[in-house]
Image (spheres, rainbow, N blue to C red):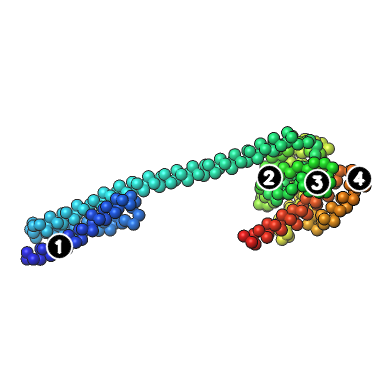
């Protein structure tokens, strides 16, 4: 019987030896990842059962002491697990706080960039000439190099680009007041609506009202301002965009604005017209170019150069 106790004791020591190593490893790791509390409690239950069997059989010897020793070491794992769980919570809280700070920083940077862009427009407006022609549009329009095109086609007026990324009609009136009104434009080319398709579907009256409000703001700034409304690009003949263009054309007619069809601009040949423009300049013709001609120059460039470049970039990238 003594030999059986010795072998039982050796078994317990072999099992028990791994637990101190596990405690040290878990403590150094500082996390509960890879540790199962349920498994630890299962081992504890096994040792408790073994101790109960020894007590019931009145086997109070050194083997029982080894059971208690192993049980104490396994409980050490529970203590380390609780400690690591607390560390995990602190790490998780710190990571959450870090993400919140990153989001706030990103948001503040966006707001700051927007304010700086508007501030730059205001600063530029102080240096710019008044009573010139303005391009007011969204993302694509913002990329059109109006100054270079104006020089190439010998415009006898300054052309300023005050377009903004993803500008919607709902924001347009306030945006005009903040960034364009100071220039008292003599002419303005408005190309808006590409970011308002969903809004138009939900409420066509609100779409029309936003357009009328913008035109009213322009006319309040300069009653004699020439206004051109540009249609929305519709390469897939979308029914909603077709309806939007009908509304824009009707608004242009009711407000005595010029309506510019983008489809005509895409077919326009800017290089051929450039030669004619050069000839007219040499002949001494000095009349202000109609806004529909200016718009066709700008958007023929946009769709022949910018759109093509973007398509090539997307295919290559």
Q: Which dot, 3 or 4, sits closer to the camera?
A: 3
SS at mark 3 in the image: helix
Question: Where does label 4 land, which residue?
Answer: 285
Instruction: Identify the residue at image location x=74%, y=48%.
Output: 145
Let me know if residue 181 appears in the view. no
Q: CA distance from mark 1 to mark 3?
A: 96 Å
Quadrant where the C terminus lies?
bottom right
Label 1 vs 3, first from the N-terminus: 1
Question: Where does label 2 land, which residue?
Answer: 164
Q: Residues within 10 Å of mark 2 (few under 14, many from 20)?
A: many
SS at mark 2 in the image: loop
Mark 3 vs 2: CB contact within 8 A? no
Which quarter of the figure has residue 266? Answer: bottom right
Instruction: Identify the residue at image location x=10%, y=57%.
Output: 62
Question: Where does label 1 land, which residue?
Answer: 10
In the picture shown, does residue 105 fall above or below 241?
Answer: above
Q: Which mark is residue 55?
A: none
Q: CA distance from mark 2 to mark 1?
A: 79 Å
Q: CA distance from mark 2 to mark 4?
A: 34 Å
In depth, the one of 165 and 256 nearer the eye is 165
Label 4 vs 1, first from the N-terminus: 1
Instruction: Identify the residue at image location x=67%, y=42%.
Output: 171
In the picture shown, does residue 307 fall above or below 288?
Answer: below
SS at mark 4 in the image: loop
């Amino acid at each position: 019987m003594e030999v059986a106790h010795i072998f039982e004791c050796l078994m317990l020591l072999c099992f028990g030896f791994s637990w101190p190593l596990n405690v040290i490893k878990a403590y150094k790791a500082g996390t509960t990842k890879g540790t199962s509390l349920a498994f630890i409690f299962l081992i504890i239950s096994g040792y408790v059962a073994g101790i109960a069997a020894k007590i019931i059989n009145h086997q109070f010897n050194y083997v029982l002491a080894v059971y208690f020793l192993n049980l104490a070491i396994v409980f050490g794992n529970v203590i380390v697990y609780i400690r690591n769980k607390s560390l995990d919570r602190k790490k998780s809280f710190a990571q959450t706080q870090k993400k919140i700070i990153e989001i706030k920083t990103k948001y503040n940077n966006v707001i700051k960039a927007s304010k700086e862009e508007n501030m730059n427009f205001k600063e530029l407006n102080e240096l710019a000439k008044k009573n010139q022609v303005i391009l007011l549009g969204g993302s694509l329009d913002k990329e059109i190099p109006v100054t270079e095109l104006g020089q190439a086609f010998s415009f006898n007026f300054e052309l300023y680009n005050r377009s903004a990324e993803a500008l919607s009609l709902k924001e347009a009136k306030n945006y005009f007041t903040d960034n364009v009104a100071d220039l008292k434009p003599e002419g303005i080319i408005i190309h808006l609506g590409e970011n308002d398709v969903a809004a138009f579907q939900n409420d066509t009256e609100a779409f029309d009202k936003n357009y009328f409000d913008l035109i009213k703001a322009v006319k309040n700034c300069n009653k004699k301002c020439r206004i051109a409304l540009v249609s929305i690009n519709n390469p897939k003949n979308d029914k909603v965009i077709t309806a939007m263009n009908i509304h824009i054309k009707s608004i242009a007619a009711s407000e005595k604005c010029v309506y510019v069809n983008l489809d005509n601009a895409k077919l326009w040949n800017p290089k051929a017209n450039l030669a004619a423009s050069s000839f007219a300049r040499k002949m001494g013709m000095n009349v202000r170019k109609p806004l529909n001609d200016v718009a066709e120059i700008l958007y023929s460039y946009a769709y022949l150069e910018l759109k093509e470049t973007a398509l090539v970039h997307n295919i290559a990238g």
